[in-house]
Image: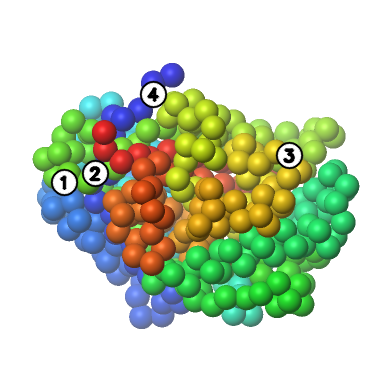
Amino acid sequence: MEGVRNKVAIIGAGCTPFRDYYDKDADDLLVDACFEALGDAGIGTGDVQAAWLGGGTEGGFLLGRSLKLDFVPVTQVNAWCATGGDAFRNAAFAVASGMYDLALAAGVTAHSEGQHPERGIFAGGGDGRHHGEWVSFGNQSAASTFATFVTRYAHHYGLSYEAVKRSLGRIAIKNYRNGVRNPLAYMHKEIDLDAYMSAPMISWPLGLHDCCVMPHGAAAVVITRAELARQFRNDFVLLRGTGMSTGTMQGRMDAAYDWVHFPENVIAGRRAFEMAGIREPVKELDIACLHDAFTVVELVAYEDFGFAPRGKGGEYVQAGVFDMEGELPVSPNGGLKSFGHAGSTPAKIYEAYKQLQGKCGDRQVQNASVAMTHEQGGQPGMYVSLVNVFTTRD
């Protein structure tokens, strides 16, 4: 399946620092991110032929108003915590079809938005504060839902509480360490295993350092058809494969649902890898930006995407396979744990773009040429997963 392979190129990207903004609203943050992206591409707002927006509650009006776009079509996207990635996906399809030559995909999360697909879903951060509200999925909070994955994972694979916690702690420690190197990240701190193990519980066995932070910010990317990319820059980045899967509530209705893997991840990953021609992800990918709203989600994703055998993800992360210096660096931007939950925005795509250009400074993965991004959102037993694979130009 060729799909959109090598038909779409990213020629510009922008991203604000993710912070607790009280002096900027959604319009301000979008202006900052989008004008950085447009400037990076060497174009102006008048060159944008269509745009897609993740986040907000005003449809496309928020982006059209913020950038003063001249009556171009703007589409708002809602795919829970995969919203920003889906905004990019839809823009990419429109460009690949030949409908538009230049399109903008942007997303924002901000105090001024009110309720949007991501706001208030997760709680807990390494600074001891909660960002957003607790939200119930039925009678469960998000943290308690994903705590179920931890206990079930331990039981299913015959692992002790201590063994699983050490593996989850290693994920948190890695992502904190990566975030220290990223000036755009919300968190700039490191912890050791003792600090991780002694942290307050949020929903047993998930503690404070297992939960991501919920700051505010915006990101944007400018895309064009691959054959036009050289008109704008030489170091453009190509979309090589994409895959998306949306669940059908089978996890709520099927007694055989095992709570140790996300079928949506498996399907989305397989589709993206097939389109991209990826057969051995750990060997062929140079970077993977995974969804880690909770540490257990990253742990399970290792296995869903074939980075580690089933039940062995903890052993792989403890062996350093996913460290910056490891075989496959995971979330060099600090992940949701340190960078912040940016699901309404294409922030992971920004990271992949900059990494493949070699412009990430202290967090740069050496000789990176293939990057993967993973977005995931939803409710218990009903998730949406989106995977993209990007490469440097041919």
Whole-angstrom CA distance, mark 3 to mark 4, is 29 Å
Where disc 2 sits, the SS reads loop
Q: Extreme top residue here?
A: 1
Where disc 3 sits, the SS reads loop
User: N-terminal of the two: label 1 or label 4?
Assistant: 4
Quadrant location of residue 199? bottom right
Q: Give the number of callouts.
A: 4
What residue is shown with label 2?
236
Residue 3: mark: 4
Where residue 390 sits in the image (x, y, percent)? 38, 40
Amino acid of disc 4? Gly
Amino acid of disc 2? Phe
Q: Is residue 284 above or below residue 97?
A: below
Where residue 153 sits in the image (x, y, percent)? 80, 48
Q: Is residue 105 visible?
A: yes
User: N-terminal of the two: label 3 or label 4?
Assistant: 4
Q: Is residue 262 above or below residue 215?
A: above
What residue is shown with label 1?
233
Give the residue at x 44% y 34%: 242
Crowd tier of the residue under label 4, counting other residues whose Cα lies within 10 Å: few below 14, some 14–19, many 20 or above: some
**Nearest the eye: 112 or 301:** 301
Amino acid of disc 3? Arg
In this view, the mark in front (3 or 4): 3
Marks 2,3: beta carbons within 8 A: no
**Nearest the eye: 387 or 85:** 387
Compared across the picture, whether 331 is left or right of 349 comes to: right
What residue is shown with label 3?
310
Quadrant into which the C terminus falls: top left
Give the residue at x 54% y 32%: 280
Compared across the picture, whether 58 is left or right of 68 comes to: right
Give the residue at x 50% y 58%: 324
Quadrant location of residue 122? bottom right
